[in-house]
Image: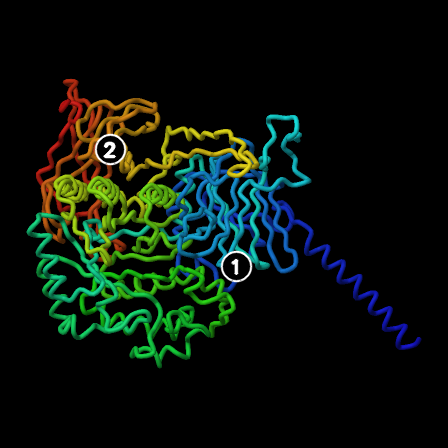
Amino acid sequence: MHDSTQHRILLKWYLLLLIAIGIVISNPVTAKENTGWQAVAHGVWRYAGGEKEKINLLDAAGITPNLARINEFPETPFPLNPEEITITRRQGKLYIKFPLEKEEQLYGLGLQFKHINRRGSIYYLHVDHYDGQDNGRTHAPVPFYVSSKGYGVLINSARYLTVYAGTAVRVDSPHPPRIFNRNTDAGWQAMPESDTVEILVPAENAEILVFGGPSLLEVVQKYNLYGGGGCLPPKWGLGFTYRTHTLFSGQEVLQEVQAFADQGFPLDFIGLEPGWMDRSYPCSYVWDPGRFPQPAVFLQTLREKGVKINLWINPYIAPASILYDRMLPYAGTHTVWNGIVPDYTLGEARGIFSDYFGRQLIQMGVAGFKIDECDGYDKFLWPDVAAFPSGTEAEQMRQVYGLLMQDMLMAEYRKINRRTYGLVRASNTGGCRFPFVIYNDYYRHEDFITALINSGFAGVLWTPEVRDSATGEEWLRRMQSVCFSPLAMINAWGSGTKPWSYPEVFEAVKEAALLRIQLLPYLYSTFAEYHFHGTPPIRPMPLVQGFRDQQKVIEGILDDTQNPYKLALRQDIKDQYMLGGCLLVAPVFTGQTSRTVVLPKGKWYDFYTGKLAGENQTITVEAKLEEIPLFVPDGGIIPMIPPQLRTPQTGEILPLEVRHYGSAPGRFLLYDDDGETFDYENGEYSWTELTAGKGPDGNLAGSQQRLSGTIFQYSDISWKFMELKR
C-alpha cells in the first residue's frame, strides 16, 4: 500500500473519530443520565458531573458550608424535574438549561439597582462599577437565582457568566408561546415568554448546586448557610459612622469627633480617606508624617473617646511603597494607576500583605478598612489580557479579587480575636460570611433602596450611604433610609457634609440616628439570625410569609422612536422591605407627600403609635417629614435600649424596653454576647426568649426566659404594650 493511500485512510478514520467525539461532547446530558444530582445536605444537591475549576467563588472566599445547620431543616424532595435539566459541553464551553413554568418568577442574580424580578432579562455577570443599567455588570454579580416555586440555583464559577432568564424560546420547547401576526393581532409580543433559564459558562467545568425548600426564605437561608453563614458584626459596627474629608489631618479628625459630641449626635467609628497615607493612587499604606505624625497616639486618643477608626485602601501598590519590591515577583503583568496588582491567590503574596497589615496597622488599633476600587471600571482595572503568576486568568481574578481582600483582612482580625466591620466595592458568592458592606459612587436614592432589597437575595450587605443633598428634605430622607440598613454612614470624603449641615431638618436627622442606637438589641439579634440560621437581615417582600408578589405588567405603547417594539413594562414592588422579622420599612423619597405600602397577610401596626395600619392590603400613608414609615406585624416584639451616643460597650449593662404590638401572642429571640470578640464561636453567647400574650385576666403580659448561655448585658426589663398606648 502506498504511503499516500495509507495516509488518506488514516486521515479518514481520524476525521470520523473527531466527528464521533464531537457528537458525544455536544450531546446534552440530562440529570437522570450520567451520575445525576447528589444530595449534599437537606435541600441541597450538587450535580455530580459539575466539576469545580481550580479557581471558583466559594473556594476564593475560603468558605466551609454549614451543613450541620442546613440539616436541621426537614428533608425536602428535589424541586425540579431532572429530565428537564440539560448540561451540555460544546467547543470548550458549558451550556446549562433549567425549566421555567409560566407563572414562575425569578429573583437574585446579584446586586442590581433597577428591578427586583429577573424574568425576561439577560444578565452578563461581571464584577464592575454599577453604571446605571441592570445588565449584570455590578459590584456583586452573584450567580445565584431563586424561584417563586421554592428553589434556587447557584453556578459556582469565577467566570463571566451570561444568564438568559426566560428570554429565549427554543425550537424544542415543550410549551411554545402562541404565534401572533403583528400586522393583524393585537396580542403580538416582541419578547415571547420563554420556558427556560439558560446559562452560558465560558469554560468546560463549573460546580452546579440546587437549593430547595417549602419557602423562598428557607431557600435563601440554605444558600447563605452553604456560604458559611452570615457575618456577625461587632456591636459598634451597627452604630453610626462618618467618613471625613480625604485630606484631613489627625487634628482635624479629632475636631470632627468633638463636634459630633457637642451636637449630641451618635458616632461609633470614623473613617479616614486616602490622605491618611503619604501617597495614594497607587498606595503606600504608610501614614503621612505631616498629617499624622504620631499615628499610635492618635489612635489611642480616639479609643479614649470611645471611637473606632477605619482606613481607606485600594489594592494597588506604589513603586515607592516599602512593599513594592517584595510584592513585585507576585504581581500581574499590568498596573492600575501605575501600581502593581498582587496575585492574592498565591500564599507568598498573601503572607506579605497579612504580615504588614497585621503588624503595622491592625495591631496598632485600626478597627476596620474600606476596600475601594477592586471592582471596575474596565478602563481603570487590569484588562482581560493580563496574566498573573499563579496562572489564574484575568477574568477569574476580576470575579474573586474582592473576596480575596476581604478574606485576608478578616483573617488578621481573627488572629487578635477582634471583630471588624468595614466597606468593600466588590463581592460575590461566599461573601456573606465577611463583615464588609458594599457601597459605590452611583447616587440615586430610589435605586439605592432597590439594591438594598436585592442584597437580601444575594447574600451580601449593601448601604445606601449618604454623601450630599440638594435640599434639606433630600438629606433627611436619605439619612432616614441609611439608618435602616446594614451600615449607617455619611461618606463626606469630598463634600465635608455634616449631619447638621441642613439645620432645618437636623433634629429629625438626629432622631433617626438615635432610634437606630435604640434598636441595637433588635438589630444585633437580627444579625445573629443571619449568622446562625442564614436568615438575611434585609428581607425582600417575596421572602415574607403571607406576602403575595403583586407583579404588574403594563402594556407597552407603540412609539416609532421610543418604543418601536411596543415592549411591556414590568412593575416591581421595589421600595419597601423587612429589616429583621418585625420591622417593615417603607422609605420616602424627596417630593413625596404620601406613599403606598403593601401589607402582607395579617394585621400590621404603626411602629410609632401602635395604631392599626391595615391588614393584607395596600394602604396609603402620609409622608411625615420627621418619620420614616415603619410597621410591625400583629404580635411583633421589638427590644430597645435608651437613646445614647454610642452602642453598648463590652460589660456595659443597660435597661431594656420591650415593645409588643397588636393583641396576638408574640415571641422574639434576643441574642447577646460580648459584642467584640469571636468567642461566640466557642459558645460564649446567650439566647433569651421574650414572649407576650394574654394572661388569665385577659390582659397582655410579657415574660422572658434564658434559653442558653450566661452573657446578658441588659437589666430592668420593662414591657410596653403598644395596643394599650393607643
Q: Residue furthest front?
A: 561
Give coordinates of residue 467: x percent, y percent. Answer: 25, 51
Q: Residue furthest left?
A: 262
Residue at point 29% right, 34% down? 586
Nearer to the camera, 74 or 488: 488
Q: Is residue 130 left or right of residue 365?
A: right
In percent of width and height, residue 421 lies at 25, 56
**Which residue sits at x=61%, y=30%?**
188
Q: Quadrant of residue 444?
A: top left
The secondary structure type at the circle numbered 1 is loop
Categorize mark 2 by other alpha carbons within 10 Å: few (<14), some (14-19), many (20+): some
Quarter of the picture holding the N terminus: bottom right
Q: CA distance from mark 2 to mark 1?
A: 44 Å
Residue 280's quadrant in the figure?
bottom left
Q: Does 329 sit above or below residue 374?
A: below
Looking at the picture, how far across and down is residue 228, in whole percent?
37, 53
Which of these two is toward me, 633 or 705?
633
Mark 2 — residue?
630
Above-or-below relation of 669 to 181: below
Q: What is the count of numbered marks? A: 2
Left or right: 723, with 559 as reference point? left
Residue 210 visible in the displayed image: yes
The furthest residue to the right: 1
Circle number at residue 52: 1
Give the amino acid type for the residue marked by disc 1 in the picture.
Lys
User: Of tags 2 and 1, which is closer to the observer?
Assistant: 2
